[in-house]
Image (cartoon, rainbow, N blue to C red):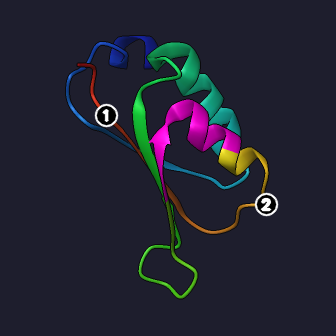
Amino acid sequence: MLKQLADDERTLIFYESPMRLVKTLEEFIIYFGADRQCSVSRELTKMFEENKQGTLREVADYFNQKTVKGEIVIVVAGKD
């Protein structure tokens, strides 16, 4: 499925478990490329809301260095 989405020009939105976040971002890098822009948001509308934007590689590296809890939303830019 990710292979088919790699050429999609629309913005892609995914809901993911905190335990699978980094693994999913690494899979996205394989299919979409490390330089594709993305945003990861967690705990939306709550006290500990967090948003991180950048390339898939930057965001994967950021979350690889920390423990993540809560509900996760990943937004990936469509192909140029």
Graded by Cα atoms within 10 Å as few (under 14), some (14 to 19) or many (20 or more), the crowding at tag 1 reads some
**SS for tag 2?**
loop
Q: Is residue 68 left or right of residue 31?
A: right
Image height of 6 relative to 73, above or below: above
Mark on residue 67? Answer: 2
Left or right: where 10 falls relative to 70: left
The residue under label 2 is which amino acid type?
Thr
Magenta residue span = 52-61
Give 34 or 22, whichever is nearer the viewer.
34
Give x and y (percent) for residue 40.
Answer: 49, 52
Residue most toward the bottom?
47
Looking at the rendered structure, the number of numbered marks drawn on it comes to 2
Quadrant where the C terminus is found in the figure: top left
- Image location (x, y in percent) of residue 43: 53, 73
Residue 28 position, x and y percent, is 53, 26
Q: Is residue 76 magenta?
A: no
Relative height, residue 42 to residue 29 (above, below): below
Q: Quadrant of residue 61?
A: top right
Which SS type dominates the magenta stretch? helix
Residue closest to the eye, 45 or 51 = 51
Specify few, some or many for label 2: CA neighbours under 10 Å numbering under 14, 14-19, or 20 or more.
few
Q: Which residue appears at 69% of the width and 50% of the height? A: 63
Give the structural element (helix, strand or loop) at label 1: loop
Q: Earlier in the sequence, mark 2 or mark 1?
A: 2
What residue is rendered at 67% in x and 48% in y?
62
What residue is rendered at 20% in x and 30% in y? 10
Q: Residue at x 62, y 53 (%)?
A: 17
Left or right of 35? Residue 19 is right
Label drawn at residue 61: none
Disc 1: which residue: 77
Indicate whether residue 59 is drawn in magenta. yes
